[in-house]
Amino acid sequence: MNDNAGYTTHLNALLDRWSAGDQLALDELISHSQSRLQRMASRMLADKPHVGRWSQTGDVLQNALVRLHRSLKDVKPESKRAFNGLAAQQIRRELCDMARNLYGPLGIGRHHKTEAGQASMDQNGRPQNEAVAPATDSIDSFEMTEFHESVDRLAEEEKEVFELIFYQGMSQVEAAGLLCVSERTIKRRFRAAKLSLNTLLKPD
């Protein structure tokens, strides 16, 4: 059994226990999904360095896990497919709130500019917190927030595929297996989702 199959089997067993009312299964669900959410948070922060310079992967992960834990008390996903959708929704909401908090009217990212020579250095001697104009940060934050919120406006089939690939980090083959459709269908839906997002973000 490969790692992904093992993950799925264990996840399904935990979902069955939680659906049946086993309270202990909730914490196990969170623990079991933690590594995948961590990879998701790390990938998202790497794509947005202006936000990543203020928040670490662990910060995003911790807040996303709290959101997921709270949601699971009200919603009992019956399948890996439903659980993945819920997890993607929580990480997306966390990223949107993080951007607003950082770059809102009172946000630290909106009013702070790292002076040259004051940035800490990474292991290769490069500045980790490079000086960035507040206006640039704000534009980047606005685009990021608009992007994540636009995902919710996609058609259901497009949103589901986009969430699995973009937020959950699944390959197209894995997504096809989860949704029980062909890889060609996944490619078509993913392409349609990206075109739809482009239209939503740039209506003109």
Image (cartoon, rainbow, N blue to C red):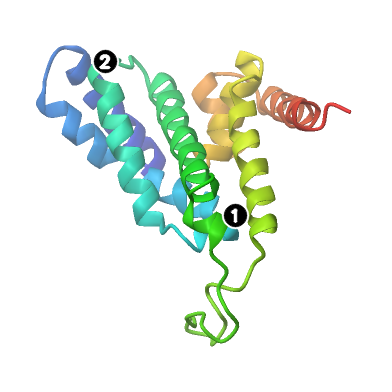
34 relative to 103 in the view: left or right: left
Give the vertical position of 91 relative to 189 (above or below): below
**Of callouts 2 and 1, the N-terminal one:** 1
Give left or right: position of 56 versus 191.
left
Does residue 113 show up?
yes
Q: Position of residue 49 (x, y in %)?
A: 58, 60
**Identity, as a three-letter code, of the amino acid under mark 2:** Asp
Residue in view at x 89 percent, y 28 percent = 204
The residue that appears at 76% across and 25% down in the rendered structure is 196
Position of the N terminus by quadrant: top left
Residue at the image position 32 percent from the left and 32 percent from the top = 67
- Give the x, y percent position of residue 78: 33, 14
Q: 24 or 200: which is nearer to us?
A: 200
Answer yes or no: is residue 35 visible.
Answer: no
Task: Determine the secondary structure under disc 2.
Answer: helix
Residue 48 image label: 1
Per the image, the residue denoted by label 2 is 74
Badge 1 amino acid: Lys
